[in-house]
Amino acid sequence: MKINQLASVFAIGTLLFAGCKSQQGKFEFLSPKTGETIVLGQKVAVRMHFPDTTIDSVVYAIDGEVIEKKQDTSVVTLDTESIGLGARNLVAKVYKAGKEDVAYSNVTIVPESPRQYTFEKVNEYPHDTKAFTQGLEYTNGTLYESTGAGSELISSIRRVNLKTGEVLQKKEFVGKSANGQDYFGEGMAIVGSNIIMLTWLNNEGLVLDKTSFEQVSSFAYQNSKEGWGLCYDGTRLIKSDGSNKLYFLDPKSYQEIGMVAVYGSEGPQDLLNELEFIDGKIYANVYGKDIIVIIDPETGAVEGQLNLMGLHTHASQSDKELNGIAYDKASKRLFVTGKQWDKLYEINVVAR
């Protein structure tokens, strides 16, 4: 046999051996694939590649919790409705003759695409262009506003005449907090006779008397280290910190009592900023965008998206981004404004 014929035989043998080896493969997930995005409510078939189909048992777990134990290699059905939104780690362990083999996968469970909304402008009112708006509340016929310290402006809490934009009462916050940061006002909410106002990097929330604006007390942040937006659902305070997480606070002790991660149809919905609680949903403006997302507070699903592009047509050099949502529960009026905007708008939400 010639040398080239020997080489050919050797090559064919090598390929056959490699083919057998690759066919045998390793214990791994065939579906769902690592990094896959799955819509909440879907039932997903979990399929594995078993190098040897004669096994003693296989155990399936999600985020460390066992969901299925089997003694064969049949398909397992994953009901995502019971798992909830978010990134989930899948682990399968197969056992045979006292030996264990492990396979891993990870998926992200997201809600369906949100309903799309636009707006109808109903009224517009004057707004102080020195108000670096961070929080907005309307209650008992009065508009309250918290502002931050942007571009030589001083953080403040204000009582405002809605129709004229006149600042009827104001308290400014100067100096530094205990952590050495200059006070920078952020979102606020009203609970009973108090205004609860966040600060940005000061790791401190301020409790103010609603009538006098005098400080009653303060509280430290916990897992959520920054203060962005705040609203009240009648039972809990809900706090944003710029991430995709919303934190629930006890309205008396101001201690964190829970958290929900917010997901849209494309994944985590971060940059959640100013918040307002309206008819059982959280309205949150997305920092840097003319968009308000509508969130289910129990699941964290973004159920709607309100596009406000084109609303503010009086832009000037001092204008910053959309920031400020207030709701008049009695008359069902929705108000929005932005940092240093010269207008505050009353709008209707219109389904597309």
Image (cartoon, rainbow, N blue to C red):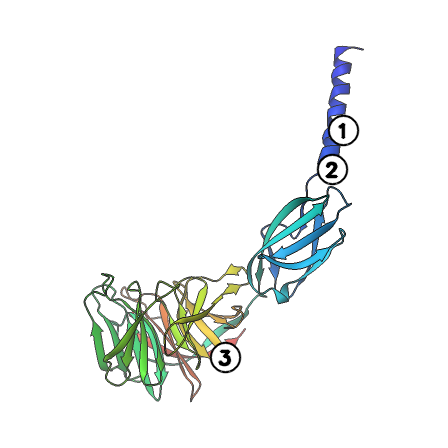
Q: Residues within 10 Å of mark 1 (few under 14, many from 20)?
A: few
Q: Residue furthest right?
A: 1
Contact (CB < 8 A) between labels 1 and 2? no
Q: Residue furthest left?
A: 175
At horizontal 52% and vertical 72% (from top left) the residue drawn is 298
Horizontal and vertical percent for residue 322? 37, 68
Residue 18 is at least partly visible in this image: yes
Contact (CB < 8 A) between labels 2 and 3? no
Regarding mark 3 in the picture, which secondary structure is present there? loop
Horizontal and vertical percent for residue 302? 52, 68
Q: Is residue 62 above or below residue 311?
A: above
In this figure, which residue is indicated by the disc labeled 1? 16
Q: CA distance from mark 1 to mark 2?
A: 10 Å
Residue 23: image tag:
2
Q: Earlier in the sequence, mark 1 or mark 3?
A: 1
**Of residues 234 and 63, which is closer to you in this image?**
63
Q: Residues within 10 Å of mark 3 (few under 14, many from 20)?
A: few
The three-letter amino acid code for the residue at tag 3 is Gly
Horizontal and vertical percent for residue 43? 68, 62
Horizontal and vertical percent for residue 8? 76, 19
Q: Is residue 69 above or below residue 247?
A: above
Total number of numbered labels?
3
> In the drawing, does residue 262 fall left or right of residue 6?
left
> In the drawing, does residue 221 fall left or right of residue 25?
left
In this figure, which residue is indicated by the disc labeled 3? 280
At horizontal 73% and vertical 22% (from top left) the residue drawn is 11
